[in-house]
Image: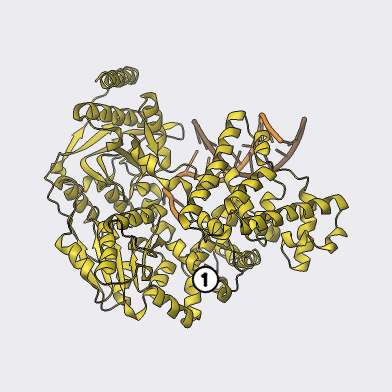
Chain colours: A yellow, B orange, C brown
Amino acid sequence: MSLNAQQRAAVRYLEGPLLVLAGAGSGKTRLITHKIVHLIKTCGITPQHIAAVTFTNKASREMQSRVADLMGGKKAQGLRVSTFHSLGLNILRRETAALGYRPNFSILDADDCSGLIRDLLRREFSDDSQVKAVHWQISSWKNAMVDAEQALALADGDAVKNLAAGLYGQYQRHLKSYNAVDFDDLIFLPVRLFADHPDILDVWQNRIRYLLVDEYQDTNSGQYQLVRALTGPRGALTAVGDDDQSIYAWRGAQPENLALLQQDFPNLKVIKLEQNYRSTGRILKAANQLIANNPHVFQKALWCELGYGDPLQVIETRSDEHEAEVVVSEILSHKFKQRTDYRDYAILYRGNHQARLFEKTLREQRIPYFLSGGTSFFSYVEVKDIMAYLRLLVNSDDDSAFLRVVNVPRREIGPTTVEKLADYAGGRGISLFAACFELGLKTQLPERAATRLEQFAQWLVDLGDRGQRGDPVAAVRDMIAGANYELWLQDNSKDEKTAERRMANVWELVTWMQRVAEQAGEDKTLADLVAHMSLMDILDRGEEGNTADCVHLLTLHAAKGLEFPHVFLVGMEESLLPHRSSIEAGDIEEERRLAYVGITRARKTLTFTFSAKRKRGGEMVPREPSRFLAELPSDDLEWQGGSREVDPVQRQERGQAHLANLRGLLSSG
DNA sequence: TGGGGTGATATTTTT
DNA sequence: TATCACCCCA
């Protein structure tokens, strides 16, 4: 497929920094990938001097594979397509010394960090009720490039801020002594580094001669500063974004960064991509009209050549249960009439809890479905255990990992022993792991305990050596076997089934690690593998999800970037969308963008539903249709339902019968 | 060590 | 109202 005039202009524009305002479905990934190939093939820039940055691993993988397709077999060796965090990790790993870290530092995930904060809170204030708030506050500060010292100055009055500011410095010191960083540090530290060391920045500006940023409206302060630093005066930057799809302000994204770019680069060129290749005219008209209610720095209007399409349906239902039933039966009858696949349908909603009833109804009808979200692979206890072992193998200073695994599986190293060990290590200013080998420890502990600790540590040293010299993955297998981890799982799971499933997770982790190792080539050490794995989620290996024929159940946030022929945007009610808390905060613009994102996912048909009543806290609460429905072009809407009152029992029976009937038709046809 | 009882919480989530 | 995390006790 070729490029349109605007896309072509954006690909070819190299005279300075470029901002591409890419509306929904306007082919922004196509633009970025073509530009990368253009830079390589036409401009002769070597791939290792080009970096493309995305937010998610999924987007990064997608971009990589599409560049590979465009290159037609010719490998773009050394091309850096990565997430912001991987890029930061890359910088950190090359500049550990300048940052005062030792090689092979660990990356702590959000849980580990919360754990550390909980411990600190307990110790300092013996009150850990505010862990989440404090963690969130520190993280926000880091994202805004505020360090511990500055935080102290910023915190006056607000209780959580005071608490967080008081802990921030200690938190950082602990991380440093663990030789560990958190996710936010992966951006924060490089930005700091570049500000303090112009010579190092210079090296990186030479290494990355052209930078492309995807989903630019989602960048936070730190990420923007990283982009600005790397871009430098040369201005070799293409940022692609859509202010109307900014839906992550609540976690620090600064859509203002779009306008800021214009300020910081006065010679910024702006190109708009307004032709949409996804949706019908009606859907786009609705999207445009809705989003016109938001203020705009950059005006933009989507158009298409795909025809006007079917009217948008708006269905009023009696209850949330009824809503699920109606949507499912609409899907069934539509599928029957149009001979479509289940995968052509998506049900989009504001909050995860809304998925439940749809899930239940789909399951009752034996309709396969795919549910977004859920527990991430890396939050399973068994996966976290193994990851902690890996971290400890690589970085013996990682006390956080040490504490997690020292007695898992049971090694008869109880809390008392660990506490004494911690006291000793603290006094000597060394890691828990190092302390296990010290003779002085033997005077503090009963001999048996000291011996067990030393054996444990020695076992890890041996494994680490093996991982260093031979095949790292084999060393990991040895570790799992040596720790008797499987036995421990069997003893600590509800039943055999769970134990098996959990062990399967462990093996999946190992298999995945093996694959990462193979992909990475021979020069990947255990440390490299572990660092990479800390930034990935095994769940977004994707493939199965896409190929399986499933109805998709997604939050509006999770739906961004995806498209479906037939979309149901459910729960179009005041206090759901826009959400109550946003109404109360007087900020419904982001909610409107959320609705906009939902609408623009649809290719052919779009159905809104809202319920007259909804169960909330056990009671049926009356509901109002969302104000956003009123902002849509009424000529393009077809309203159904809501008018007649039917006996609920009778209705329920009728609904069930209808569904069963449809299912029968489908399976026979 | 595990099960039951209790209390907090009910927007969105990636790395 | 339903769920879930966490705590305590047997």
- Residue A500 placed where, x, y %? 58, 33
Q: Chain of mark 1?
A: A
Q: Is residue A296 among what the camera can see?
A: no
- Say which residue appears at 81% left-offset and 63% top-offset: A438
Quarter holding residue A495: top right
Q: Is residue A363 among what the camera can see?
A: yes
- Residue A558 placed where, x, y %? 37, 47
- Three-letter code for the amino acid on which mark 1 is drawn: Arg
Q: Residues within 10 Å of mark 1 (few under 14, many from 20)?
A: few
Q: Nearer the viewer, residue B9 or A515?
A: A515
Q: Nearer the viewer, residue A195 or A319?
A: A195
- The residue at the far bottom in this view is A199
Quarter holding residue A59: bottom left
Q: Is residue A229 left or right of residue A43?
A: right
- Residue A549 placed where, x, y %? 33, 34
Q: Is residue A303 left or right of residue A462?
A: left
Q: Which residue is mark 1?
A: A94
Quarter holding residue A454: bottom right
- Residue A353 placed where, x, y %? 43, 39
Q: Total number of numbered labels? A: 1
Q: Is disc 1 placed on a helix, strand or loop?
A: helix
Q: Is residue A389 left or right of residue A316?
A: right
